[in-house]
Amino acid sequence: MDLGAGTGRAVLRLARREPATLVVGVDADQLAMAHASQRGRAPANAVFLVESAERLPGPLEGRADLVTVALPWGSLLRAVLEPDPTVLARIAALLKPAGELELLLTDDPADLAAYATVGLNLLEMRAAVRDDVERLSSAWAKRLGIGPGKPAWVWRFGRVGRPQRRDF
């Protein structure tokens, strides 16, 4: 599930790359996703939902293996950078028990403890590489000038109580 899907291009890329996976793009701006969601453009495994993160999860509760938020703006940006526990709890509720939240940001969240209070543990934080930006972003990365001159970071969170990964 891609929150703040914008133009929906990242949703379409993932849906075409993984035809057995249902990919859901969610954005509060219907016009932004209109072109990508037109019949004939979107593969059958790509679905678009016009909704704000503040009003989720509804019927999507506990359904997502992965929720991505890439270069958000507006209320979604505020919710992840100046963590709003109410909105974070709604985002966390989208995840299955072993699900992950992946953020692509150009700044650091102000309060990581807010993530923990809604059941999200930090799994990884690292500088984003080109593949991350291409995989997670649509047109925003180019507009923001993401690259060597303007870095971005990947933040990955997992649900509390999720199975721990072990390297043997």
Image (cartoon, grey):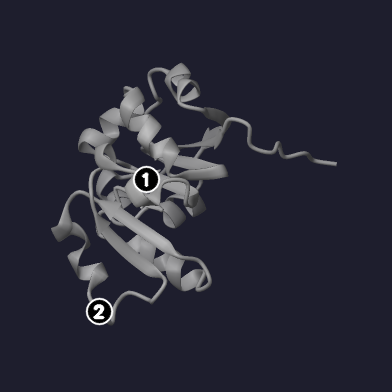
The residue carrying mark 1 is 70
Judge the density around disc 2: few (<14), some (14-19), many (≥20) Cα neighbours within 10 Å.
few
- Mark pair 1, 2: CA separation: 25 Å
Picture disc at residue 53: none
Of mark 1 and mark 2, the one earlier in the sequence is: 2
Above or below residue 16? Residue 76 is above
Residue sitting farthest toward the right:
168
Q: Is residue 24 left or right of residue 34?
A: right
Residue sitting farthest toward the left:
31
| Residue 145 point in image, percent of width and height | 30, 45
Viewer-nearest residue: 144 or 82: 82
Which amino acid lies under the numbered mark 1 shown in the image of this protein? Ala
Say which element carries label 2: loop
Residue found 44% across the figure and 36% down from its top: 92
Residue found 46% across the figure and 56% down from its top: 135
Residue sitting farthest toward the bottom:
40
Judge the density around disc 1: few (<14), some (14-19), many (≥20) Cα neighbours within 10 Å.
many
Residue 110: image quadrant is top left
Q: Nearer the viewer, mark 1 or mark 2?
A: 2
Q: Which corner quadrant holds the C terminus?
A: top right
Residue 163: image quadrant is top right
Above or below residue 114? Residue 95 is below
Residue found 42% across the figure and 62% down from its top: 23
Viewer-nearest residue: 124 or 101: 101
The residue carrying mark 2 is 39
| Residue 83 point in image, percent of width and height | 35, 24
| Residue 119 point in image, percent of width and height | 51, 28
Q: Is residue 152 visible?
A: no
Residue found 30% across the figure and 29% down from its top: 79
